């Protein structure tokens, strides 16, 4: 990963929240901050004030700050910026460079195609919970998300809470194979717990808690987000996250979680 966090600004309140989140994260993890404003071809917006305010917010955290105005398509430009960045941060919705987009369309599109973590911030958080939540099912994408969640929890000196949600299909062969729902639940719990054990052993400095609810992954993660400073999800997964492209689990969490959400894609 690169040594800087890239944050997109456009003068909107969510973009301001994104800058505040980015600056604090850069300070915690010893990274620089790159602030960009994407101007669409033919656009007449003046980003100077937004960039100046964002730079001051970054400098208040005593991190290195650079700014740039880039002409181009918003989504394509931000995806390109993600290639060399540690992570990319943007507001849940915006103005200016984000004009004309449906609520969440830019964040969803960028999160689905960017390289590495994309953090979507809402309004500034009210208080701290000292807890990072991560959705985990043992898949490759989930492992990448877990790595980012571990890094975030360590930098924040926070607890890491692992949610491994699962569901029983309507016509489940497992119920017949195991003979009872209780056995199915016990097996799911054992498998989910087994996925977490190596992470707990590899990170003895972290307090890692876990839950294996029989619940839709989106519902479980949104519920956990109510007492979290950050929720981390992979861009797709297996098991309870089966066939989940960003449009399902990631999309649902982005639209309903009360705290910032990080969607993490493996860097191929």
Image: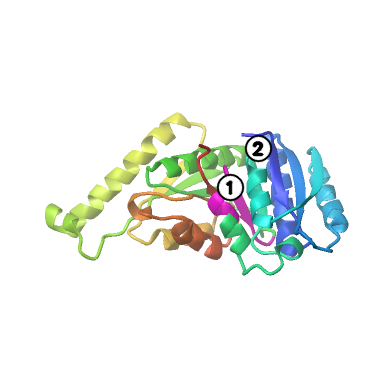
Q: Position of residue 31 (x, y in %)?
A: 71, 36
Q: Which residues are magenta?
A: 110-123
Looking at the image, which is closer to me, 48 or 189? 48
Residue found at x 37% / y 42% = 138
Q: Position of residue 91 (x, y in %)?
A: 67, 58
Which sits earlier in the primary sequence, circle 2 or circle 1?
2
Pointer 2 and pointer 1: residues touching (CB < 8 Å)? no
Query: Residue 258 lies in what quarter of the image?
Result: bottom right
Rate crowding at label 1 as few (under 14), some (14 to 19) or many (20 or more) other CA atoms within 10 Å.
Answer: many
Q: Is residue 183 magenta?
A: no
Q: Is residue 117 magenta?
A: yes
Query: Residue 141 lies in what quarter of the image?
Result: top left
Which residue in the protein does label 1 denote?
Answer: 114
Q: Position of residue 68 (x, y in %)?
A: 81, 47
Looking at the image, which is closer to me, 241 or 220? 241
Query: Mark 1 falls on what kind of element?
Result: loop
- For the image, the number of numbered tags is 2
Query: Residue 214 lies in what quarter of the image?
Result: bottom left
Query: Mark 2 falls on what kind of element?
Result: loop
Which residue in the protein does label 2 denote?
Answer: 84
Looking at the image, which is closer to me, 83 or 13? 83
Residue found at x 78% / y 43% = 61
Q: Position of residue 33 (x, y in %)?
A: 75, 42
Residue found at x 83% / y 43% = 59
Q: Is 47 situated left or right of 101 in this image?
A: right
Image quadrant containing the N terminus: top right
Residue 87, compared with residue 229, is above or below; it is above
């Amino acid at each position: 990963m690169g040594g800087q966090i890239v944050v997109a600004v456009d003068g909107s309140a969510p973009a301001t929240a994104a800058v505040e989140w980015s600056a604090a994260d850069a300070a915690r993890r010893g990274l620089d901050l790159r602030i960009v404003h994407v101007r669409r071809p033919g656009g007449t917006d003046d980003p100077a004030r937004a960039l100046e305010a964002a730079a001051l917010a970054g400098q208040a955290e005593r991190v290195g700050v650079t700014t740039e105005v880039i002409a181009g398509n918003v989504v394509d430009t931000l995806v390109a910026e993600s290639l060399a960045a540690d992570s990319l941060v943007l507001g849940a919705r915006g103005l200016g460079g984000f004009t004309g987009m449906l609520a969440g369309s830019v964040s969803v599109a960028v999160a689905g195609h960017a390289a590495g973590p994309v953090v979507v911030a809402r309004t500034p958080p009210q208080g701290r919970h000292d807890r990072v939540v991560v959705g985990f099912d043992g898949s490759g994408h989930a492992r990448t998300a877990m790595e980012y969640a571990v890094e975030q929890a360590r930098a924040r000196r926070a607890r890491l809470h692992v949610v491994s949600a699962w569901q029983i299909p309507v016509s489940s062969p497992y119920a017949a194979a195991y003979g009872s729902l209780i056995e199915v639940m016990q097996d799911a719990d054992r498998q989910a717990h087994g996925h977490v054990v190596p992470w707990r052993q590899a990170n003895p400095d972290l307090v890692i808690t876990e839950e294996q609810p029989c619940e839709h992954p989106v519902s479980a993660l949104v519920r956990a987000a109510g007492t979290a400073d950050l929720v981390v999800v992979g861009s797709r997964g297996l098991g309870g996250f089966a066939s989940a492209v960003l449009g399902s689990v990631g999309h649902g969490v982005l639209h309903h979680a009360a705290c910032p959400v990080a969607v993490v894609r493996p860097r191929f």
